[in-house]
Image: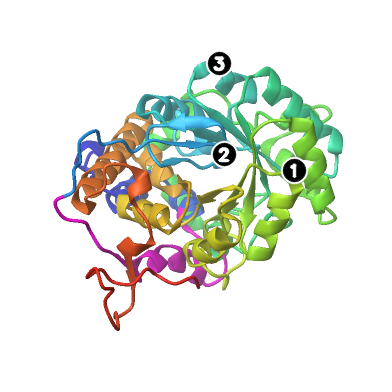
Amino acid sequence: MSVQKCNNTNDFRRLAKRRLPAPLFHYIDGGADDEVTLERNTSAFDEVRLIPNGLADLDGMDCSTTVLGQKINWPFFLSPTAMTRLFHPDGEKGVARAAERVGTMYSLSSLSTESIETIGVCTNGPKCFQIYIHKDRGMTRDFVDRCKAAKFDALCLTIDTLVAGNRERDLVTGMTVPPKLTLSSLASFAAHPAWAWRYLTSDAFELANVKRHMKGGGDLSSIIQYVNSQFDPTVTWRDAEDLIRQWGGPFAIKGIMSVGDAIRARDAGASAIMISNHGGRQLDGSTAPFDMLGPIVDAVGQDIEIILDSGIRRGTHILKAIAMGATACMVGRGYLYALAAGGEKGVDRALDRMTAEISRNMTLMGCARLSDLDRTMLQRGTPIDFSAAGRLPAIPAQ
């Protein structure tokens, strides 16, 4: 099977599973504890159905939107993901270039394997940097200054990772810090010589943005342990306000999962919130971002951009989120599977398939632009009655 025969996220997932050693595949694929939230993130979309318009004038189809000060051609952009070059040497640079070609934004992780400066020059597309507030506030300030110099367009503060989630697949495979690989895991690495050859013949693997803060450098395990030691459980909304002022540009807070926190983010001065549970990798048993979208839109949707993250697998998932009131969505695993399956060309293929789904389904919905989508085009559960116009009632706030 080749990437050109992959037509959806599940196809790329199957191919990634073939091409990656098991510990690396499960690192991408897995979630916390029993993975209930991981599954719920996607299944939540299945509980809402789409209601199309007929005989609509679709002249001048336009799927673009503006988010974090940047116009993008499609209502989704690419989430920040850590250690991307571990899955394919094209890594962050390949993903950023693919995002630019399709006309959307790329988000770079603090724990990336390419530096802020490298991504700043490798793409002219819109760029967002994901940041934490570290115990060493000097490291946080350094990241902000470097992003300004590299002409990043927006900053995204992640607030749901004060401690790593209990990802039991990683415990089983030994994908821990330091690694504790099992015989089965070692055999899986040996059974994937193509991955091993690419890894050994590519540039040395490193966490490019944080290594300069390690005195005397250090190996990868030491750097990751240092980063983990920098997560600060005493961070408050006041720290977020200070960071927003320091950045002085479009700013999102990622990890919002309640109406109360959405209101606090708005009041702190954020430009946008990212409703996210970290792809189900942190608190298992939490609700899905899509479940919280309606209430959060009702509370702050007139005041702040609302971005939905976690669980996106199909173009129709994105259309449902837009109809519910989201400004845009983010995709993470969807492009990581494709990168692992086929490098930069795999990401190109995945983004091509996702944009084709959005365009096709906008047409089938009878919508020429994103603003045509609203809650009257969504149905949850079995309808009881019909509106006078013959349309099902708008989906109520949750």
- Write the start and end of the magenta stretch as one range: 29-55
Q: Earlier in the sequence, mark 2 or mark 3?
A: 2
Image-based side of 36 in relation to 266, left or right: left
- Residue drawn 82% across the image and 54% down it: 236
Which three-letter amino acid code belongs to the residue tagged 1? Answer: Val
Can you tell which quarter of the image residue 217 is in? top right
User: Which residue sits furthest front?
Assistant: 388
Which three-letter amino acid code belongs to the residue tagged 3? Answer: Val
Which three-letter amino acid code belongs to the residue tagged 2? Answer: Met
Measured Cα–Cα span from mark 2 to mark 1: 13 Å
Q: Earlier in the sequence, mark 2 or mark 1?
A: 2
Measured Cα–Cα span from mark 3 to mark 1: 25 Å
Residue 324 pos. (x, y %):
43, 59
Image disc number at residue 121? 3
- Residue drawn 36% across the image and 35% down it: 347
Image-based side of 58 in relation to 39, left or right: left
Q: Of helix, strand and loop, which one carries label 1?
A: helix
Q: Nearer the viewer, mark 2 or mark 3?
A: 3
Q: Does residue 383 appear anywhere in the picture?
A: yes
Q: Nearer the viewer, residue 138 or 303?
A: 303
Q: Nearer the viewer, residue 14 or 296?
A: 296
Residue 284 pos. (x, y %):
58, 69
Q: Of helix, strand and loop, which one carries label 3?
A: helix
Image-based side of 129 in relation to 388, left or right: right
Above or below, comparing residue 397 to residue 130 in the picture: below
Query: Is residue 44 part of the magenta span, yes or no?
Result: yes
User: Which residue matches tag 1?
Assistant: 227
Q: Of helix, strand and loop, which one carries label 2?
A: loop
**Quarter of the N terminus within the rendering:** top left
- Residue drawn 82% across the image and 27% down it: 216
